[in-house]
Amino acid sequence: MNDNEQGIQIVYYSRTGTARQVAEDLAALTGWPLAEVSDVATRAGLAGDLRCVIDSLLLRRVAYRYGGPAPADCRRLVIVAPVWIGKLAAPMRSFLRERAPLGCDTSVICVMSRQGAFNAAEEIARLGRTPPSPVLALRQSDVVSGTVQQPLRTFADQVEAAGRQGGGAQRPAWISPKEA
């Protein structure tokens, strides 16, 4: 659906370009508009790596830039973000915190090295009015190898179906297993 009549927007943060690739692939597949959260200060090199670790461990708010359509104008925000040390990347966390509670439904794609995607999705759930649905966890190695096209197609279909159902996703069991 290329006219975006469902009011879906993609917002992404990417330090290395992997999450950007996922967001751009999803936008090419769906026609949904893209918005980027980017760093104000560079995170290049060893000093940048160290800042990533510290920002994640301490859950620090960091300065960022936002470029794209206003997220308040959408009905569903598709968040594409990397996972740093089992947590949502600090620039995306800061962006979402400033807008909490989010005024729209959310869907999430987390790009991770090995693990932590569901921890990041849970962080996003705490900032929104409803839990994100659907949630897709992708490994960085799969993105780089190009084997994520089918999962992205399935995700896009699920996002569109959620929009037709009127949002209001049920809380997935992995977020609150005792409540399921």
Image (tube, rainbow, N blue to C red):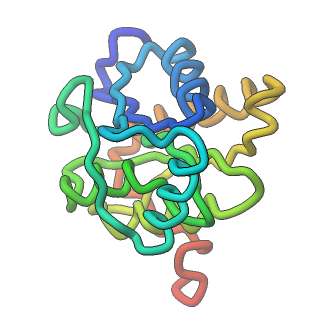
Q: Quadrant of residue 21?
A: top right
* Number of marks present in the image shown: 0
101 and 3: which is toward the camera: 101
Is residue 157 found left or right of 94 in the rendered image? Answer: right
Can you see residue 64? yes
Q: Position of residue 70 (x, y in %)?
A: 17, 31
Q: Is residue 8 above or below residue 56?
A: above
> Residue sitting at 26 percent across and 48 percent down?
63
Q: Residue furthest bottom?
A: 178
> Residue sitting at 35 percent across and 19 percent down?
33
Locate the N terminus by quadrant. Answer: top left
> Residue sitting at 52 percent across and 51 percent down?
47
Q: Position of residue 177 (x, y in %)?
A: 60, 83
27 and 59: which is toward the camera: 59
> Residue sitting at 56 percent across and 44 percent down?
109
Q: Quadrant of residue 166?
A: top left
